[in-house]
Each structure stands twice: as C-alpha cells, then as structure tokens.
Image (cartoon, helix red, strand yellow):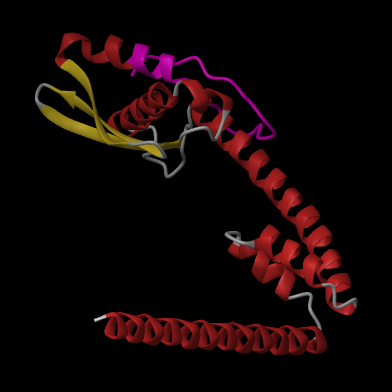
C-alpha cells in the first residue's frame, strides 16, 4: 500500500491519523481502475443519515464501512450532513479493505476524530446545561411547594413537561414531605375535576329534559 501522509490531532499523540483524502489517494494508486468505492444511502431523513461504502477490487468486496451523522449535531452537519457521512463511510471502508486494522488498532480519519471531539464537547455542554436547569427548576419547584404557590407549581411543571430526564432529576431532589404534598395535591385536583364533570353532566341532563318537555308541550 502506498505510504500515506498522517497527522496527530487532538489530545492523542500516540497514534497517527490519516484523512480520507489520503486514504482515497492511496487506494487509487494501489488499485487504479480495478478498484471501486461505491456508497449507498441507507437512511436519509430529517433526523439522521446513514451511509455504507463498499471498497471493491476486481468485483470482490474487500471491505465495507458504515457511518451515521445526526443533522444539526455539528456545524458541518447543519449544512453538509450527507457529504460528511459519505466521507466517513468511505474512510472506514478503505481502512477495512486495506488492512489498516490487522493488528487490532485503528487509524481513524481526521474527520472521524474531529467529529468525535465535537460530539464529546456537545455532550459536556448538554450535561452542564442539564445541571443548570436542574438547579433552577428544582429550587423553584421546592419553594413553590413550600409556599403552596399553585401558579408557580404549574409553571415549574410546564418547564419539565416533555423533558423526562429533567423531570426525573427534579423529582429525585424532592423530600418525602414534598412528594406527599404533590400526591395529595393531585388527588385534590382530580376530585375537583370529577365534581365539575358531574355538575356539567347534571346540567346537560337537566337541559335535555327541559328541552324534551318543552317540545312535547308544544305538540
């Protein structure tokens, strides 16, 4: 295999990384027009893209590479998620086809490592955002319960609605007394709704009887 240009990126300094352009160049120099790189789009919707590339030489598939990208997860994936996904799957296919991993190690592409670094950064940011949201909502929710502030309780519940991780985390900060308060509160709200529903049903029955009586009397 043609010697490839590699580089060191990120915090890791013990392994080389070859970008996909270098891999494609080496693949072409070795196999020429006998080699083919064929990419198939497996998934392409509004959420994610999955591609598979086959590295074929003289009709024989020497290796395949799969890649997945989430739309909007990085700056590149906001505008060019499909192209980014294709590049990653090509790099992986060439790696498997040319034996870069025969010793059990992996020469990752620059693109793969950069994507991983960005995703790790975003995970860290998400965790930090969750911590801030938890601290704010939990404090506000507990204060609202202690003050028996129905309006604030409803506002905190609205902040948690649709966010199960946040709701679960906030519930984990509540004391047994706070949880008992919420249970009794919910029972009270349910009873109140039932009373209103029964009253509305009684009014409807009364109105229906009056209407029937009026129509019968008119005849």
Q: For residue 146, say whether it is visible.
A: yes
What x and y, as percent, mark residue 131? 77, 56
The stretch in magenta equals 1-26
Residue located at (60% from left, 85% from top): 190
Residue located at (43% from left, 15% from top): 22
Quadrant of the rendered structure where residue 164 is?
A: bottom right
What x and y, as percent, mark residue 187? 65, 89
Quadrant of the rendered structure where residue 21 is?
A: top left
Q: For residue 18, say whether it is visible.
A: no
156 left or right of 53 in image: right
**Looking at the image, residue 127 lies above or below residue 198:** above
Q: Nearer the viewer, residue 151 or 80?
A: 151
Q: Nearer the viewer, residue 12 or 37?
A: 37
What x and y, as percent, mark residue 120? 63, 42
Q: Nearer the viewer, residue 166 or 92?
A: 166
**Prevailing secondary structure class for the magenta stretch in the rendered image:** loop
Whether residue 20 is in magenta: the answer is yes
**Looking at the image, residue 58 lies above or below residue 133:** above
Whether residue 142 is in magenta: the answer is no
């Amino acid at each position: 295999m043609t010697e490839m240009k590699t580089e060191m990126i990120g915090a890791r300094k013990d392994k080389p990384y070859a970008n996909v352009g270098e891999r494609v160049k080496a693949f072409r120099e070795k196999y020429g027009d006998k080699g083919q790189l064929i990419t198939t789009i497996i998934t392409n919707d509004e959420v994610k893209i999955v591609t598979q590339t086959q590295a074929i030489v003289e009709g024989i598939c020497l290796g395949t590479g799969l890649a997945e990208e989430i739309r909007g997860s990085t700056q590149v994936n906001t505008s060019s998620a499909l192209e980014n996904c294709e590049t990653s799957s090509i790099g992986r296919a060439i790696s498997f086809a040319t034996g870069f991993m025969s010793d059990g190690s992996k020469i990752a592409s620059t693109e793969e490592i950069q994507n991983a670094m960005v995703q790790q950064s975003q995970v860290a940011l998400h965790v930090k955002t969750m911590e801030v949201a938890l601290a704010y909502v939990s404090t506000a929710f507990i204060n609202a319960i202690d003050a028996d502030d129905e309006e604030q309780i409803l506002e905190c519940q609205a902040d948690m609605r649709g966010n199960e991780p946040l709701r679960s985390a906030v519930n984990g900060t509540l004391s047994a007394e706070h949880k008992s308060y919420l249970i009794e509160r919910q029972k009270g709200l349910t009873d109140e709704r039932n009373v209103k529903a029964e009253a509305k049903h009684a009014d409807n029955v009364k109105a229906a009887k009056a209407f029937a009586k009026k129509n019968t009397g008119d005849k």
